[in-house]
Image (cartoon, coloured by chain):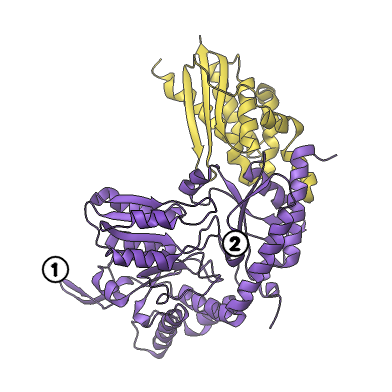
Chain colours: A yellow, B purple
Amino acid sequence: MGLASLNNLYREIVLEHAQYPQNKGSLPKATHEQTLHNPTCGDTITVQLQIQDNKVIQACFSGQGCSISQASASILTEVVQGHSIDDCRHMVTAFSDLVIGQEIEPADEQLLGDAAILGSVAQFPTRIKCATLAWKALYQAIGATEEGR
Amino acid sequence: MRDNFATDFPLLKQMVNHEHLVYLDSAATSQMPEQVMAAITDFKKTDNANVHRGVYTLAQRATERYEGVRKQVAAWIGASDAREIVFTKGTTEGLNWLARSLKIHQGDKIVLTMMEHHSNIVPWQQVAHRLGAELEYIEMTPDFRLDMADAQRKIDGRTAVVATTLVSNVLGTVTPVRELAHLAHRNGAVIVADGAQAVPHMPVDVEQLELDYLTFSGHKMLGPNGIGVLWGKKALLDDLDPVEFGGEMISEVGLNETTFKPTPWKFEAGTQNITGVIGLGAAIDYLQMVGWEQIQQNNQQLVQQALSAMAKIPGLEIYGKPTDMVQTGIISFNLAGIHPHDVATALDMQGIAVRAGHHCAQPLMKALGVPATCRASFYLYNTTTDVTRFVDALVATKEFFTNGIS
């Protein structure tokens, strides 16, 4: 097979996000945040969100990890912007389905935007957790503080 | 003498991702030769019965085989008495039993090293928390060896246990265990050695090394998983209470009181992993057939070849001391700017299996200042062709992540 198949996983856009991550840093006005670890590899991702009137104003991430987890987090912070909390939950579910190789609705794929490119990770089962780490953090961030608000 | 043992290992004759498999993760688990598989199958076909129970001939035969391996293991590690060999399910279980049953008191010190695997850290942490004992770690020198001056400072009159690995599973460092044993004994402490990475690669003689306890696993030395050994000096084992209770380990059971069998049988409660023991014996047979000289020569040749080729790859950093690595077959490394997981996936696509991650040694990763490393570990079935494939694949991986594929 050789390295040619790697192009499926490390698409140009993925490598670009890994190399030049978007919205990496901390968000002073964060209203929601969650840090998650991947104990098998030691990767850590913190996702921070500023949510106002049920809308994501801004999203940020920090932490370190492989190019898949970094790119996934970077893309996440871009695609959730402007979406409602319910939309975010829906995106997490769609993304989780996508990366384990399940078919998702065209509308959901559109909702995921660039994140849908990571669907190719389904061909690399040992790397699925790398892709989902930031999304799990997002899910817990919006879930954890929802009831109190 | 044969110069290539790979043909004895059926698993290695396969394609992975359309490439011939190059298996470089023997420090995690070794592959099994046909001879060990055959010994296990033969035992199941001809001698299988529960041990130490039946009066019939078959049970007697199984018991003799089982106890025969105990003697074989004793001779293999230089123990003078087969009763010093306790069968466990692996290194981790042996370390847990020791942490739970050694005499440790409030205010005592347990001295470990910065190079330990989690299995030689977490059990001691648990016991330290429970009993109010204190943990201390012997630091490393910049050239990835143990800082013996620090060991002299830390191992003192309050120390009850010194627990150290014989070989670091990340760095391939061989620890000066005999010196540590001296320091421990001079201060009235016992020395516990984790032999998981050492026993597959080099002769380990418990008396020469002046150890008190040694633990190791079958699956890293060509044997099956689920079987391991705890060796301890007879007088010390006599003094330890069993951790598990039940059938087979008892002498006499009353309604309120039970007396136990003598060492080592008092530690072996319930039906043991008899098949695993037979496999372990066959693995020792195989290692003895190959011989330490051949094993060491192969490690040396492959690691030297790999190190000199890897030195030509810009941005490749190696964690370990070459004079240690050539003995233990372990090379930990990182490619600058590429996460170890990405490297491991890229190598996998080229048919090469290496480990990437923290290697169950998070404190050591922190000390090295890296989140993770890649690790290639070689064993007697690896060849110079494997090394060439590995290094070529590394070069291609670096190229892919730097310039992509045109």
> With A52 as the anchor, is A103 left or right in this view?
right
Q: Quadrant of the C terminus of chain B?
A: top right
Q: x%, y% of residue A143?
A: 46, 24
Q: x%, y% of residue B138?
A: 41, 53
Could you give the CA–CA distance between mark 1 and mark 2, rounded to whole angstroms?
55 Å
The quarter of the picture where residue A147 lies is top left
Residue type pointed to by label 1: Asn
Task: Give the number of callouts.
Answer: 2
The quarter of the picture where residue B383 lies is bottom right
Q: Is residue B20 visible?
A: no
* Callout 2: SS: helix
Q: Chain of mark 2?
A: B
Tell which of B354 and A75 is nearer to you: B354
Residue type pointed to by label 2: Met
Read off the residue under disc 1. B256
Q: Earlier in the sequence, mark 1 or mark 2?
A: 1
Residue at (37, 89) in percent of width and height: B56
Tell which of B400 and B181 is nearer to you: B181
Residue at (61, 73) in percent of width and height: B295
Label 1 packing within 10 angstroms: few (<14), some (14-19), many (20+)? few
Q: x%, y% of residue A88?
A: 56, 22
Instruction: Identify the residue at the far top of this view.
Output: A53
> With B356 as the anchor, is A38 left or right in this view?
left
Q: Quadrant of the N terminus of chain B?
A: bottom right
Read off the residue under disc 2. B325
**Does A91 appear above or below B301?**
above
> With A122 as the anchor, is B66 left or right in this view?
left
Label 2 packing within 10 angstroms: few (<14), some (14-19), many (20+)? many
**Does B141 appear above or below A116?**
below
Check residue B116 in the rendering and tell me which mark sits there, or answer none. Answer: none
Asked if marks 1 and 2 fall on the same chain, the answer is yes
